[in-house]
Image: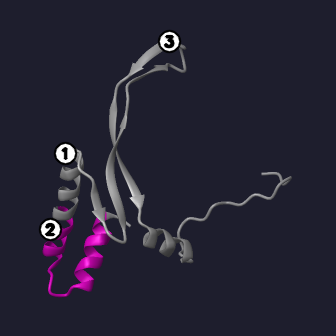
Amino acid sequence: MTRSDLVDQLAERFTQLTHRDAELAVKTILDALSEALENGHRVEIRGFGSFSVSHRPARVGRNPRSGEQVMVPEKRLPHFKPGKSLRTQVDQSQGSGEKDLAVEPGSKL
């Protein structure tokens, strides 16, 4: 699902909203979420999940081509942890999403 799919679905479900209003609502929510994460806050949506910022400290890495040591700077990355009800709902669904390809042991690809 893309951002525009979300806007379309919101406009269809709530007929009192115009497409432009639905687009503004989605933009406002995503902007507020992004701003909170930029400021290092945790965002929790009950029944859906929580967004937080994880920190990766600076480290010494290696250039795979030359083998020379390279300093990898510290990073702050967004992290999403799904809530229990979302995990249960996804686990029990029989959706038409992408399926993993199961390969039997001993078979040739």
Front residue of 51/100: it is 51
Give residue 59's quadrant in the image. Answer: top left
> In the picture, which quadrant includes the N terminus?
bottom left
Query: Which mark sits nearer the N-terminus, 3 or 2?
Result: 2
> In the image, is residue 31 part of the stretch drawn in magenta?
no
Q: In this view, does 45 lie to the left or right of 72?
A: left
Q: Marks 1 and 2: which is nearer the front?
A: 1
Residue 23 locus on image (x, y percent): 18, 69
Q: Give the residues drawn in magenta, as a range.
A: 3-27
Look at 34% across and 59% down and name the residue there: 50
Reply above or below: 71 against 19: above
Look at 14% across and 80% down and name the residue there: 18
**Between marks 3 and 2, how big is the CA–CA gap?**
49 Å
Q: How crowded is mark 3: few (under 14 residues within 10 Å), some or many (20 or more)?
A: few
Give residue 31's quadrant in the image. Answer: bottom left
Reply above or below: 8 against 105: below
Q: Residue furthest right?
A: 106
The residue singled out by tag 1 in the image is: 39
The residue singled out by tag 3 in the image is: 68
Task: Give the residue type at disc 2.
Answer: Leu
Residue 56 locus on image (x, y percent): 38, 34
> In the image, is residue 8 part of the stretch drawn in magenta?
yes
Asked whether the beta carbons under mark 1 and mark 2 sit within 8 Å of each other, the answer is no
Q: Residue 105 carries which label?
A: none
Look at 38% across and 25% down and name the residue there: 58
**Between marks 3 and 1, how big is the CA–CA gap?**
35 Å
Look at 23% across and 50% down and name the residue there: 41
Task: Give the residue type at disc 1.
Answer: Asn
Residue 86 locus on image (x, y percent): 44, 70
The residue singled out by tag 2 in the image is: 24
Task: Give the residue type at disc 3.
Answer: Glu
Secondary structure mostly seen in the magenta stretch: helix
